[in-house]
Image (cartoon, rainbow, N blue to C red):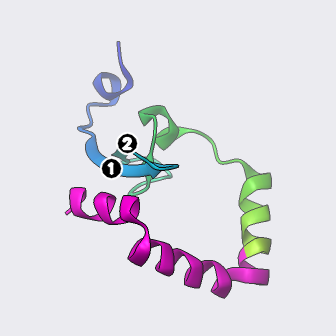
Amino acid sequence: MQLRQLIDLEEKMAWAKRGAKVVRKFRCVGGPRHGRIVADLGQCFAAPDVAKRHRLKLTKAKIGSKMVRKAKRTKRVNPTSKRVKALNK
């Protein structure tokens, strides 16, 4: 029996990039990661990793604006990112 049968949720398909490839992923419709795109449906209900959460908080405090600028440029320029954007429309 699969997780979606146990909790009676319909997953929503989403596309994301992994390196230069476009791969199929899922958008969480429940759990603590509601709305996030994950590779496996089980991740939607997994316990959070506190150390990773804290490390990202520190990184965003240090270089958050730099991360945002770089991500915006990638999404505007990278052909794979453009393909993902079109597929998710």
> Which quadrant of the figure contains the N terminus?
top left
Quarter of the rendering containing residue 82: bottom left
- Span of residues in magenta: 60-89
* Residue 40, magenta (yes or no): no
Q: Nearer the viewer, residue 89 or 77?
A: 77
* Residue 73, magenta (yes or no): yes
Gap in angstroms between the C-alphas marked 1 and 2: 6 Å
Quarter of the rendering containing residue 41: top left
Q: Which residue does the image show at 37% across and 42% down from the upper left?
A: 25
Q: Position of residue 47 (x, y in %)?
A: 63, 42
Task: Report the disc number at residue 25.
Answer: 2
Proximity of marks 1 and 2: CB atoms separated by less than 8 Å: yes
For label 1, the SS is strand
Magenta span main SS: helix
Q: Nearer the viewer, residue 39 or 20?
A: 20
Q: Which residue does the image show at 33% across and 30% down from the upper left?
A: 7
Name the amino acid type tagged 1.
Answer: Trp
Q: Which residue does the image show at 23% across and 56% down from the upper left?
A: 87
Task: Report the disc number at residue 15.
Answer: 1
Relative placement, left or right, of 81 versus 51 is left
Quarter of the rendering containing residue 70: bottom right
In the image as oriented, which residue stretches furthest toward the left?
89
> Which quadrant of the figure contains the C terminus?
bottom left
